[in-house]
Image: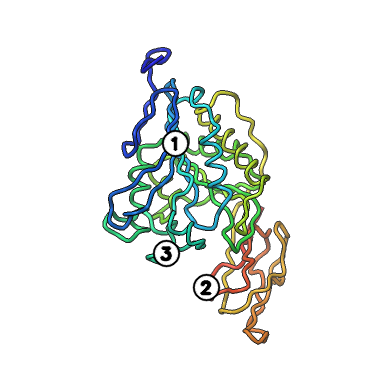
């Protein structure tokens, strides 16, 4: 069929930092960026270009080093999705934060100690996290119509599967984001406030007017077959909603999360949680305790408000100011 598609329209592949596949083809390889802070890092990618014109969609995973379901699901999708049925183009970056991944580092990137997902918009001449944030935003997100960013609870977090989208006053974009979230089909759906001075990848993409979805599946440094199946189904249904894949999407009902309260550790100590995922608590209920290294009590951590336990820290070590429990109102 060559470069000519039905109706004369050819799928555009807008990401200039990697070679574009031919229409109806897939490329799977590694790329590098020339920035001094990123020298020596090879990033895997899957690039799929359809024969028919359509949207350009970026899927990212592995922003944090200890979140494993996303990379596995992204790799599987990149390997199994038939590019011949794709409309438009799809770029999958299954493991964004190489430094943190190989160091098995939760949240922070070795070399600069920064949380990559709090380093946006980044800067070209910055540290490894800042340079990577800049490249992701300008080279990956800016050319795309939509972004799906895959996360999970990190090595020491457990969570109830949920997704998040951002409020926007653009009615058409709001409807598209809502449809994307419904199609992914996770049991809990959160709507964040409109991003102002965003520091995360999805917040930055939303502020740039992209259709955006943040996905949270699994945790505790594990990637089960169930996690992978959940993400695979959600990604394919989301891509149908975006018109990247053929077929009618099958949205699934979700419980809306209207607001969330993050409970922080008041002191550094040994954390012993007293809650379970999806447990309903009332204001004043015990969430857990903090003790010193001799077992002496340091603090009782109680719920500042009523809500459902959306996620909580499972690590014994807790530092003052770190999130221990997230309570969501349904």
Q: Residue at x 54, y 51 (%)?
A: 151
Q: Which residue is under mark 1? A: 28
The quadrant in which the N terminus is found is top left
Instruction: Give the alpha-carbon distance from disc 2 to disc 3, as whole Å.
Output: 21 Å
**Dot 3 surroundings within 10 Å: few (below 14), some, or many (20 or more)?**
many
- Residue 49 visible from this viewpoint: yes
Please, what secondary structure does the residue beneath circle 1 have?
Answer: strand
Closer to the observer: label 3 or label 1?
1
Between discs 2 and 3, the one toward the N terminus: 3
* Tag 2 near tag 3, CB within 8 Å: no
| Nearer the observer, 237 or 47 | 47
For marks 1 and 2, the one nearer the N-term is 1
Residues at marks 1 and 2, CA–CA distance in whole angstroms: 41 Å
Residue hosting label 2: 321
Decide if residue 61 is on the left or right side of residue 234: left
- Percent x, y of residue 174: 50, 39
Q: Which mark is residue 110?
A: 3
The structure residue drawn at horizontal position 37% and vertical position 13%, both measured from the top left corner, is 8
Residue 271: quarter of image: bottom right
Q: Residue furthest top?
A: 7
């Amino acid at each position: 069929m060559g470069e000519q598609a039905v109706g004369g329209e050819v799928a555009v592949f807008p990401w200039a930092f990697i070679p574009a596949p031919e229409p109806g083809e897939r490329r799977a390889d590694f790329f590098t960026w020339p920035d001094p802070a990123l020298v020596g890092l090879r990033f895997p990618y899957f690039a799929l270009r359809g024969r028919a014109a359509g949207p350009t969609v970026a899927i990212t995973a592995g922003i944090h080093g200890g979140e494993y379901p996303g990379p596995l699901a992204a790799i599987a999708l990149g390997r199994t999705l038939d590019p011949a049925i794709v409309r438009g183009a799809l770029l999958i970056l299954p493991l964004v934060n190489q430094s943190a991944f190989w160091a098995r580092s939760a949240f922070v990137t070795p070399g600069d100690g920064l949380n990559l997902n709090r380093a946006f918009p980044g800067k070209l001449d910055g540290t490894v996290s800042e340079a990577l944030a800049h490249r992701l935003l300008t080279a990956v997100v800016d050319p795309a119509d939509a972004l799906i960013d895959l996360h999970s609870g990190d090595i020491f977090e457990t969570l109830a599967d949920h997704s998040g989208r951002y409020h926007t006053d653009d009615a058409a974009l709001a409807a598209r984001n809502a449809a994307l979230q419904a199609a992914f089909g996770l049991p809990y759906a959160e709507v964040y406030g409109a991003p102002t001075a965003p520091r995360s990848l999805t917040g930055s993409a939303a502020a740039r007017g992209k259709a955006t979805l943040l996905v949270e599946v699994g945790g505790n440094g594990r990637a089960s077959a169930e996690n992978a199946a959940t993400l695979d189904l959600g990604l394919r249904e989301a891509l149908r909603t975006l018109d990247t894949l053929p077929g009618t999407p099958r949205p699934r009902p979700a419980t809306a999360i209207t607001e969330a309260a993050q409970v922080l550790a008041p002191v550094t100590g040994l954390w012993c949680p007293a809650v379970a995922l999806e447990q309903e608590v009332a204001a004043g209920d015990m969430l857990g305790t903090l003790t010193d290294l001799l077992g002496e009590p340091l603090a009782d951590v109680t719920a500042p408000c009523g809500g459902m336990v959306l996620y909580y820290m499972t690590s014994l070590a807790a530092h003052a100011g770190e999130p221990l429990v997230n309570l969501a109102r349904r």
